[in-house]
Image (cartoon, coloured by chain):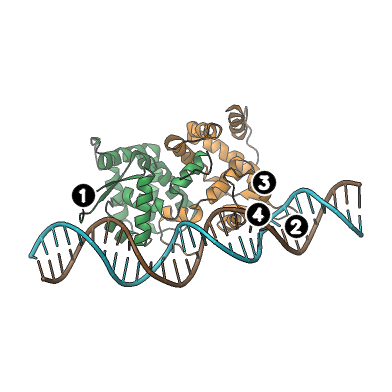
Chain colours: A orange, B green, C brown, D cyan
Amino acid sequence: MQARSGCPINAAVEAFGDSWSLLVLRDVMFGSRRYFRELLAGSEEGIASNILADRLKRLVAAGLLTREDAGPGRRAAYSLTEASIQLVPILAQLGDWGVRHRPTTNRLRVRAELLASGGPGLWEEFMAELRAIHLGHPTPDRDGPTVMQRLAEAYAAAR
Amino acid sequence: MQARSGCPINAAVEAFGDSWSLLVLRDVMFGSRRYFRELLAGSEEGIASNILADRLKRLVAAGLLTREDAGPGRRAAYSLTEASIQLVPILAQLGDWGVRHRPTTNRLRVRAELLASGGPGLWEEFMAELRAIHLGHPTPDRDGPTVMQRLAEAYAAAR
DNA sequence: CCAGGTGCTTGCGTTTTGCAATCGGTGGTG
DNA sequence: CACCACCGATTGCAAAACGCAAGCACCTGG
């Protein structure tokens, strides 16, 4: 794709500035959905299968996901890349903005609030976890529950 | 518009997740473009007039811009709102991501780098300046050049 | 009266989106 | 072997959005 300009903000918009790309990345990142059917069935917004297929291809081409093919008839796994792991602060801030300025569901709000209130320190911790899960980096040893677990607990606890 | 889900990230995506909205906001915010013709002529990416007109309407409806009508034949001024001023951290991080992961023009890169390296402190200072310009808040008195001036200088100095 | 500036609007062809149904391939089960 | 559920898509079609070029009604200054 030919870039419309040399502006870094425009570069980001061209990479994932549409209705679905960020939501797919969100589900892979926070929902731990790694397979086509998981993403399709678990989609909060009800993405259509052709749109999902198209976005997965685009995201792989853009270097925001990798696809591990397991052979025909086997489900392929999608993983985050370093470039998409570095979207954690952006997704956290987008969530924070949404919580501040738009009506949101309670259950989904708590995750955004937890992530926003944790700040850059928590984001880095979460990014380290994602590098372990998606890039095979060594697991960072830390006391207590992981950020991923804390997010899941907050989600489960909220009504 | 009917929200697709109660997710705060989805709320943000629905508000400005398209090819043009963030670029228009960027030009109003960093380029100090307040009028239709200014936005049209100064657009780095070459936005079409009908698209610009549509996006301005949508952004006003979404509470991300206000339009001050100066009567027929007079040019109307667009101003940021508190909701769009709170996009400063997001735009800063988007720019940072673009610089890291995509080729960018030197002149446009320096602004993103300055804003990213300044961190939350600099963002808050810039947001206070924007509140003075767009919302009529009292000008915060500070020593030295404003963030806006520093951004303009960095842009002018770069080749 | 005219030239120039104001914010759009219109027409039209192309592209993208969204929805529903379907497809060929595989693995497991009876 | 027959059957069936699951795999990641693909296809057809209608609606919406996009992109381009031109035009519009209004006002100001000379």
Dot 2 amino acid type: Gly
> Disc 1 is attached to a residue of which chain?
B
The answer to whether the residue labelled 4 contacts the one labelled 2, judged by CB atoms less than 8 Å apart, is no
Q: State whether discs 4 and 3 lie on one chain.
A: yes
Q: State whether discs 4 and 2 lie on one chain.
A: yes
Instruction: Decide which of tag 4 and tag 3 comes sooner along the chain.
Output: 3
Q: Provide the residue designation for mark 4.
A: A67
Disc 3 is placed on an element classified as helix
Measuring from the top left, give residue B73's x and y in whole percent.
Answer: 20, 56
Dot 4 amino acid type: Arg
Q: Is residue D4 left or right of residue C20?
A: right
- Tell me the mark number nearer the camera, choosing from 1 and 3: 1
- Tell me the mark number nearer the camera, choosing from 1 and 4: 1
Instruction: Decide which of tag 3 and tag 2 comes sooner along the chain.
Output: 3
Q: Is residue A22 or residue A84 the one in the foreground?
A: A22
Measuring from the top left, give residue B111's x and y in whole percent.
Answer: 36, 50
Residue at 56%, 52% (x, y): give it.
A64
Disc 1 is placed on an element classified as loop
Using the rendered view, name the quadrant where residue A125 is placed.
top right
Task: Report, in whole angstroms, how far the alpha carbon at label 1 lies from the one at label 4.
Answer: 54 Å
The answer to whether the residue labelled 1 contacts the one labelled 2, judged by CB atoms less than 8 Å apart, is no
Q: Provide the residue designation for mark 3.
A: A38
The circle drawn on residue A71 is: 2
Badge 1 crowding class, 10 Å Cα cut-off, few under 14, some 14 to 19, many 20 or more, is few
Badge 4 crowding class, 10 Å Cα cut-off, few under 14, some 14 to 19, many 20 or more, is some
